[in-house]
Image: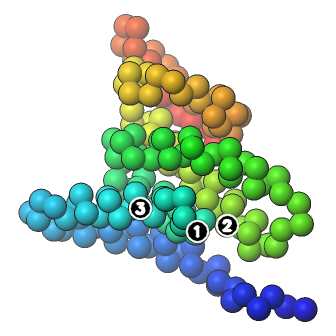
Amino acid sequence: QPSKKRQKPAAHWAIRQWASLAVVTACQKFQEYTNFRSIVLQLIWQALGPSKSLPTRYGGLIALRQFGPKVVDAIGIDVICDYWPTWQQAMLEKNVDDTRVEEVVMTVQAALETVYVYFLGISVGEQMSRHPSIDWYDVLGDAVTPMAVMAEENEFAYSTCFI
């Protein structure tokens, strides 16, 4: 018997991607309104909240990364670290419908791509000073493998990141 819950078309993922670009474009276009960007970022942060659906969190993550590594650092890293165990557990669930599997996979992929933006834009030294308690292997396991090279004396920079 078909589910009575309305199925979302696959295009809703693309709409969220398009909307994230539109939001960043609007922030650039209206940068003379000093509060506009902060209001948009607050709305994105709210979209990442615990009561929000996975597609909403997906939209929040892809919008967040459009603002660059410093914004991801300020808003997204702690959120991703907090939710990651829940998302990983959801990926192991048995007997779930295809829609739920797709939502979890898309959200996890958005989280990994957001972490990628962070790794490539924030130096290792900055990461250690801002998030000293994060051991990326403990948080993400082998889902992300950053590759670092020495940029300057005693300073490493990520040259690539495997997801």
Secondary structure at numbered mark 3: helix
Mark 3 vs mark 2: which is more N-terminal?
3
Quarter of the image where one finds residue 90: bottom right
In percent of the image, x 23 and y 60: which residue is there?
37
Query: Which sits in the foreground, 27 or 48?
Result: 48
Q: Residue 69, position in %: x, y? A: 38, 42
Secondary structure at numbered mark 2: helix
How much space separates mark 3 and mark 2, taking CA atoms? 18 Å
**Given the current orientation, which residue lies at the most extreme top position?**
153
**Which residue lies under the disc numbered 1?**
53
94, above or below 80, in the image: below
**Which residue lies under the disc numbered 3?**
46
Neighbour class for label 2 at 10 Å: few (<14), some, many (≥20)? Answer: many
In percent of the image, x 48 and y 59: which residue is there?
48
Mark 2 vs mark 1: which is more N-terminal?
1
**Which residue lies under the disc numbered 2?**
103
